[in-house]
Amino acid sequence: MLNFKLSLPTEVFFGKGQIKVVGEQVRRHGGTRVLICYGSDRVKRQGIFDAVTAKLVDKGIAWHELGGIAPNPRITSIREGVRLIREHRCDLIVAIGGGSVLDCAKGISAASGYEGDPWDLYTRKGEVKGVLPLGMVLTLAATGSEMNGTSVVTNLETKQKLAIRLPMLKPRFSVLDPVYTYSVPPDQTAAGTVDIMSHVFEQYFSPVPGTFVQDRLADALLKTCLHYGPVALKEPENYEARANLLWAGTLALNELLTYGKTGDWATHMIGHGVAAHYDVTHGVGLAILFPHWMQFVLGDDAQGKFYDLARNVWGVPLVMERMEAAREGIARTRQFFIELGMPARLREVGVAEDMLPTIAKTVVEFGEVGVFRKLGEKEVLEILKKAY
């Protein structure tokens, strides 16, 4: 296990009715004029938006809004958000939604003190000078953005999907009410479950030895998804299922699993390459790609991690040989994704075969990806072809 420093600065308010803290939390962190970010009108139809603004008004806090933030959030939304921040002199951002809205809000926060184009921050041509405080009201179990400092954004003009990661972008507070996830459609519930599992996988498959604690925590989160993902699909208003998935999503990417080790993240990078060109839903792309990445990197030296996954998560019988068990674990992973309703091939989501080389080049634009096994353009292309 590697040395590490633990820092989880976000205050989490979990459970029914926790929206009550929004006004006092905004005030506590210096907010007097707030920019509220959201995606679809679902948050307004269901009263979540009004619940937030009522708490702000109660504390004498002015607010302005930026709506229509798309899945795979666009750099154009960040530019508009920065414009609104400056026009209305906003001093805090509240994001209402899932990971896309939260990531966009972080991008606006990062770019609020930068004089150039916000895209410069994602291409490393510019440097974040300061950030606005962030508060989150989560409506989807998926990305874990409510406790981390990562913002992933798409530029449709350049066909790139890039990220910035800064500790200062971790939200000051996040409200997690499982009831707010009841209305999430089945396809998004399924994609969110895959997203949670994929975040765990990226940290599970690490070359660092001696991380028993982190790996067993990962096992528990994966088993939570296996148990409660199907329940949430069948019973969308099952509080127990929604609550466990919501908390699993947070724990999967608040850095707890990666302290003392390095994560891989190659599959996420490949998924970002696909989404940059085809705007594929994040969890959907990962459901297609992860089993193929697993099969590609499986070898004698990687067998141990895959055997652990097969035994501890999937319950593969002890009588199986280690390599046979490892392959069975990969097969069960893929089958579970299919049972959730996820596609199994890139062609099913509209990806053209002749675009695979271009996507591979996009993925390795800044160098090789992955640490469990380093992948260059040739290896990425081979995975894409197998996934096609």
Image (tube, grey):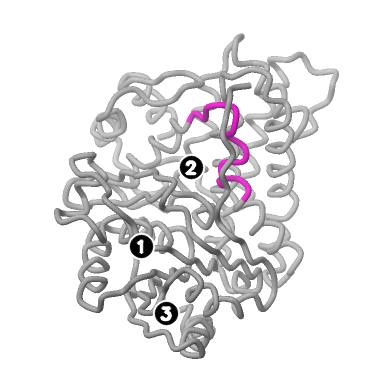
Tell me which amino acid carries mark 3: Asp
Q: Secondary structure at mark 3?
A: loop
Q: From the viewer's perspective, is residue 195 above or below residue 15? A: above
Numbered label attached to residue 286:
2
Toward the top, the furthest residue is 300
Give coordinates of residue 221: x percent, y percent: 69, 44
Is residue 155 or residue 278 the one in the foreground? 155
Q: From the viewer's perspective, is residue 168 above or below residue 184? A: above
Label 3 neighbour load within 10 Å: few <14, some 14-19, many 20+: few
Left or right of residue 57, residue 157 in this image: left
Give coordinates of residue 307: x percent, y percent: 71, 21
Q: Is residue 209 magenta?
A: no
Left or right of residue 7, residue 114 in this image: left
Mark 3 vs mark 2: in front: 3
Tell me which amino acid carries mark 1: Leu
- The residue labelled by disc 3 is 41
Left or right of residue 318, residue 1 in this image: left
Mark 3 or mark 2: whose residue is earlier in sequence: 3
Q: CA distance from mark 3 to mark 2?
A: 27 Å
Residue drawn at (23%, 41%), measured in percent from left and top?
123
Mark 3 or mark 1: whose residue is earlier in sequence: 3
Left or right of residue 145, residue 224 in this image: right
Residue drawn at (35%, 60%), measured in percent from left and top?
104
Q: Quadrant of the C terminus?
A: top left
Q: Main secondary structure of the magenta part?
A: loop
The magenta stretch spans which residues?
A: 251-264
Numbered label attached to residue 70:
none
Q: CA distance from mark 1 to mark 2?
A: 31 Å
